Image (cartoon, rainbow, N blue to C red):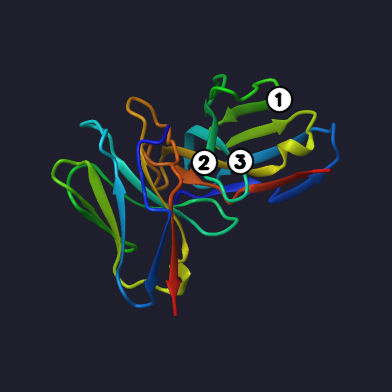
Amino acid sequence: DAKTTQPPSMDCAEGRAANLPCNHSTISGNEYVYWYRQIHSQGPQYIIHGLKNNETNEMASLIITEDRKSSTLILPHATLRDTAVYYCIVRVDGTYKYIFGTGTRLKVLA
Amino acid sequence: GAVVSQHPSRVICKSGTSVKIECRSLDFQATTMFWYRQFPKQSLMLMATSNEGSKATYEQGVEKDKFLINHASLTLSTLTVTSAHPEDSSFYICSASGTSGGASTDTQYFGPGTRLTVL
């Protein structure tokens, strides 16, 4: 079973920040949190990952709570092309496997 | 960097035939490759994990004799769906992790997927 839970869908206005939450309350100390997105009929695209500290790259920011039981992916200025299903994944401890949850379907509105 | 390709992107076949799907890492050495399947409006389901030169490890409920996986080199893995039936119709996606070319062993890089339709 997936170790993460996410809201099934969210809307965001174009140009505004999109904040996508993820709960991973059973995460263990050395498990990373990964975020991917999947645009319709394509393979998932890597966005960002982190362990304890907040992370930022050219696509997004990742905020991880101090207890590591939840995280938020932030797309600072959402565009229509950001419409996709966003997956939060905790890699299975001791392996390189990902178990995908149901993800959040983000719709960016014009 | 860290680009993964799949071929073909789309295939239609008759029931009972076998179909081979290729997954290639274009600019890095893929020490581990993964195969997933995705049904419409559902999430990705991991089918198997393969390491170069080793037998694949299949997830529970995945028939290894039906879904043959070969990872013969550091840039190529193949998935063969044997004696395909309509219920095998799905979107098959591979991913790879590895070293060099900007890739990381900790991160999976996904191919664009192959849509299989079995008539």
- Between disc 2 and disc 3, whose residue precedes? 3
Question: Mark 2 or 1, which is nearer the eye?
Answer: 1
What residue is shown with label 3?
Answer: B23
What residue is shown with label 2?
Answer: B95
Of all residues shown, which one is farthest toward the left?
A66
Residue nearest the viewer, comparing B18 with A2? A2
Identify residue type, mark 2: Ser
Identify residue type, mark 1: Lys
Between the C-alphas of marks 1 and 3, the distance is 18 Å
Identify the secondary structure beneath mark 2.
strand
- Classify mark 2: residues with Cα within 10 Å, few (<14), some (14-19) or many (20+): many
Residue B14 vs residue A85: left or right? right
Identify residue type, mark 3: Cys
- Classify mark 3: residues with Cα within 10 Å, few (<14), some (14-19) or many (20+): many
At x 59%, y 23%, the residue is: B61
At which x and y percent is residue A30?
Answer: 23, 32
Question: Mark 2 or 3, which is nearer the eye?
Answer: 2
Location of residue A91 by image quarter = top left
Identify the secondary structure beneath mark 1.
loop
Residue A11 vs residue A44: left or right? left
What residue is shown with label 1?
Answer: B66
At which x and y percent is residue B30?
Answer: 49, 36
At which x and y percent is residue B86?
Answer: 78, 38
Residue nearest the viewer, comparing A84 with A52? A84
Q: Is residue A85 above or below residue B66?
A: below
Residue B100 vs residue B9: left or right? left
- Between disc 1 and disc 3, whose residue precedes? 3
Subunit under mark 3: B
